[in-house]
Image (tube, rainbow, N blue to C red):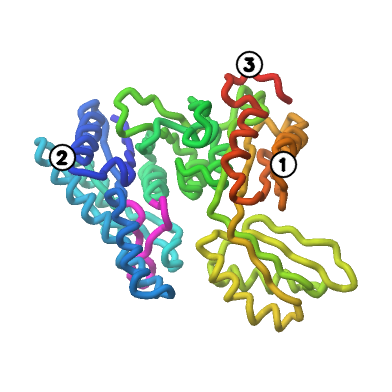
Amino acid sequence: MALIVQKFGGTSVGSIDRIKNVARKAIAEFESGNQVVVAVSAMSGETNRLVALVEEITGFYNKREYDVVVSAGEQVSIGLLATAIESMGYKARSYLGWQVRFRTDGAHSKARIREIESFRIRKDLDAGAIVIVAGFQGIDDDGNITTLGRGGSDTSAVALAAALKADRCDIYTDVDGVYTTDPRIEPKARKMDVISYDEMLEMASLGAKVLQTRSVELAKKYTVPVRVLSSLDPNSTGTMLTKENAMMEQVLVSGVAYDKNEAKITILGVPDHPGVAATLFGILGDAHINVDMIIQNISVQGGTDVTFTVPRTDYAQALKALEEPIKQIGAREVVGDPDIAKISAIGVGMRSHSGVAQTMFKALSQEGINIQMISTSEIKISVVIDEKYTELAVRTLHDAFELDKDAGDRVTG
């Protein structure tokens, strides 16, 4: 008997008919002889509705109360799914995040899981029930409800799979796997049968919406076999996340990702003294604002410019947090641009192949797309460009690296 964790997103449980479809998928897995735990999101559009209600009251809300409101959607989903399964003649038991003790830190709206108490789940599984758990939710040490951030149900599911030592975690979504890029932008995008944890981690962190970044981090850390597949297509074979292998290393670039949820901030005239950067970025860290790409110019006459990117949702908060500190350190001013996008080429083959940067920069140049910032790692190259060129840049790079072709048929690199 295997233990399978299934996760269904908002689209998959967006109506009563779809909830019944999810129930049948869970039952089919159970009928094949496996124990089944299901993590679900709120019904499609529900979290957005709850967020809008909070923001209608005030733009600067208390994040503890925000979590109380936006976590409500999952309670409806798990109750309806449990009811659907029981109506089909099977045992089911639903749990909220605090009931199975998804213990998290206290960072409201972006909490991180520390521990999962799984004894209740195991007891119900041993009793022959299908267990349904609310994704996205947790509880901190003071008993406050927390949420894991948008897409947090993916993280909930993989964390459950790791805690329960599940044999596999199936992430059901509205797409049938991981593509070389967003098929809504590039119709020639190709579905990948397998992808390494590292490649998926880069794609998720760089804007691909298939999986939340932290879910991939957990999958890699605990070597959880994860399959991404469609809940709407019964013939979907999906994409399997796996360890890197020799065949993957032969592929120069595996995919192109983009992220429009970025904003650029530049601090002009920063005094070139030890500790100044630590002070500035420490302030942002204390405000739980993640900083992504960072560029510091060469010091001229004792002053330098520091440019970095933050999530667009944190842009206004970051500017406000830096107002007084930049005056105190003697910087000239802070300016920003929320209308940017980050475009990235990803592939584990970059570790052993050269020429990726040249191909990428040349392709963008030929289309008249100006590069504002550049960042690299072992398996990715990212550039910041004007947001209005996002779709053109994605299609251009997809063609430049011949991602519509199988690996053996490509000639680039």
- Circle 3 is placed at which residue position? 409
Q: Position of residue 53 (x, y in %)?
A: 31, 67
Q: Residues within 10 Å of mark 3 (few under 14, many from 20)?
A: few
Q: Earlier in the sequence, mark 3 or mark 1?
A: 1
Q: Main secondary structure of the magenta part?
A: loop
Mark 3, mark 1: which one is toward the viewer? 1
Residue 288 percent across, percent down from the top left: 53, 67
Label located before the other in sequence (2 or 1): 2
Q: Residue type at mark 1: give it.
A: Gly
Let me know if residue 322 appears in the view: yes
Return the residue nearer the eye: 3 or 377.
377
Direction from residue 1 to residue 273 in the image, left or right: right
- Outermost residue, top side: 409
Residues 176 and 40: in front is 176
Residue at label 1?
A: 368
Q: Is residue 141 above or below residue 208?
A: below
Q: Which mark is residue 85?
A: 2
Q: Residue at x 38, y 38 (%)?
A: 171
Would you say residue 221 is visible in this rendering? no
Residue 354 horizontal/vertical position (percent): 77, 31
Identify the image quadrant of the C terminus.
Answer: top right
Name the quadrant of the N terminus.
top left
Nearer to us: label 2 or label 1: 1
| Magenta stretch contains residue 368 | no
Pick whichever of labels 2 and 3 is earlier in the sequence. 2
